[in-house]
Image (tube, helix red, strand yellow):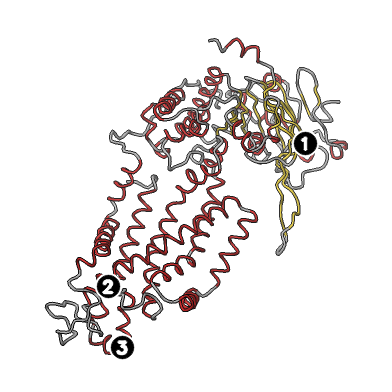
Amino acid sequence: MALAAPLQQAQGETLVRVENLKKWYPVTGGSIISRVVGHVKAVDGVSFTIRRGETFGLVGESGCGKTTLGKVLLRLQEPTAGAVYFEGRNIFELNKEEMRKLRREMQIIFQDPYASLNPRMTVGEIIGEPLEIHGVARGREKEKRVQQLLEVVGLASYHARRYPHEFSGGQRQRIGIARALALNPKLIVCDEPVSALDVSIQSQILNLLSDLQKEFGLTYLFIAHGLAVVKHISDRVGVMYLGKLVEIADKREIYANPRHPYTEALMSAIPIPDPTVRRERIILEGDVPSPINPPSGCRFHTRCRLAEEICREVEPSLVDIGNDHWVACHVRTR
Amino acid sequence: MLLALPLARREAEPETPGRPDDATGARQVIRRFLRHRLAVMGLVILAALAVLALFGRQIAPHDPNAIIADVTTDAPSPGHPLGLDPVGRDNLSRLIDATRISLSVGVGSVAIYVTIGVILGALAGYFGGWVDMVIMRLADVVLSFPTLMLILVVTAVVGPSFWNVILVLGLLGWPPVARLVRGEFLTLREREFTQAARALGARDSRIIFRHILPNASGPILVAATFGTAQAILVEAALSFLGLGVQPPQASWGNMLIAAQSLTVLEEKPWMWLPPGLMIFISVLAINFVGDGLRDALDPRLRR
């Protein structure tokens, strides 16, 4: 394994740096002439880094903007403001052709394995397409590479001739993974890759993802809506609420010592497989406020059990409380 | 829950039973098409019509434009099973010769307007914004004219002829196709597999032609077949009104002109019934083929 040594050195080096990223969707109104009456602030000023070779877990409730963040980070959508540096280059400053070339390095695995595969293409065509697009391999060589990829993700080479609808959900997700792997990317955004699967299959896919990470030195941005899945696979975890990151820390740190009240509430929602354990549940009141008019100050203050006067007025920023543990909370960082 | 389970190692889920003769692509489409009985019947009829259209002159017993002078009745007779038309030409030969004209008008005009409709609809749906705005308003304008009226006026201005009928039908027929294609593109553009292609670095042309268009082909094909049938009917109507294909060239529509006379309609059914039946049969056959093709092209529908 000649790969292993430089990889070890590379640990801790920054692969992706996200700076103050914003994605606002305009809300239009008016009957004859449409005008913008507001914005859905799906992602509203997010900054973090992803280190080479790690898995950065991103959690949050539905609608908190984590999927949007993943898509903007790959420039599948244009940002409203902010920057994403991939190996030091701001990807939003690249022109169309440069961006197209850079896509070899960054890939995505989608949540819904039923919607993410073109029903009119065979599995071989789907997995071979990235090779064709970037002129990596053609003809016989491409076929060989496709068969290798199928085997890497635990499928058989004769599956290449079949269509996606002939496979189960877990198998389809493996096809999606093989497609993402085809170009040997450095970064893979996993957008809730197991949420649509049965629990028994979820663990198989998660294991496959961590095996592949070791084998190919991949970096993951792993998006999920519960901390349980993220705990299994992540090195560091970021918690998102209403378009903002509220806490970032090492996995062990955040599970042992959650500081943000929202993280605490999420933690207490993880089931413990032991009926004799009693613990205090923190149950959040009310719904997530609308991202069109997010609450002033700290966005969580409307549901927070610790909220004080300052939380309503001043927006807290992420503060390092030591141990590379960042929290955005007035009360807890005092 | 998930964490409590002993995590299984990499082993594939039970797979769908494999078919040893899992054919791919075109062969599968053909197999699925052949399973559709009405479609196969329609295809056989269409093939027969196509033979009539291509070799009509050789098959027809008489010259379709020659006036038969030695027969004194226009009723069916041994040499002329469908009788003679009011001018004295052999009806069967004219019916056969008209097949070429009617099918060409149907196929030709639809080929023109499906091409225009797909291109404009794809541009509007894929790129959106002002491109979409301009194209769709143009479609609205064309659609807001009373169609038959417009066709009558245009043919009256440019002069009625075989080519003009094709052109007029072709240039005016695209808006419904453009709308249909735009709608398909709007939904397919946002589908995850299109986004996946974009994430892989596919160019717009590849996304349009490999990912979106094949998935929109079903509705387009159905529109095209119904359109062909429709065009044959419109040509018949135009020719019946005297503004379509001009005599002496026979078309099914202008053969029906004979039925404008009440005596012919009541007492000489051999003059108008055969062209009417030909229109009916060809329109039906085309529609069946369209249905069958739509089902065969969709790999999700298979039994």
Relative placement, left or right, of B88 versus A191 is left
- Position of B281 with respect to B119 (left or right) is left
Disc marking residue B261: 3
Name the residue tied to disc 1.
A304
Q: Is mark 2 on a helix, strand or loop?
A: helix
Residue A223 appears at what percent x and percent y? 62, 31
Q: What distance separates the C-alpha of mark 3 from that of mark 1?
A: 88 Å
Residue of label 2: B277
Q: Residue at x 74, y 54 (%)?
A: A36
- Name which residue lies at 53% across and 21% down: A212
Which of these two is toward me, B9 or A163? Answer: A163
Q: Please tell me how crowded label 3 is: few (under 14), some (14-19), or many (20+) other residues with Cα within 10 Å.
A: few
At label 2, the amino acid type is: Leu
Crowding around mark 2 (Cα neighbors within 10 Å: few <14, some 14 to 19, many 20+) is: few
Give the amino acid type for the residue marked by disc 1 in the picture.
Cys
Q: Mark 3 or mark 2: name the one nearer the start of the chain.
A: 3
Q: Which of marks 2 and 1 is in front?
A: 2
In the rendered view, would you say B231 is above or below A282? below
**Quarter-wise, where is residue A147 in the image?**
top left
Please state which amino acid type lies under the numbered disc 3. Ser
Along the viewing direction, whichever of B6 and A275 lies nearer the viewer: B6
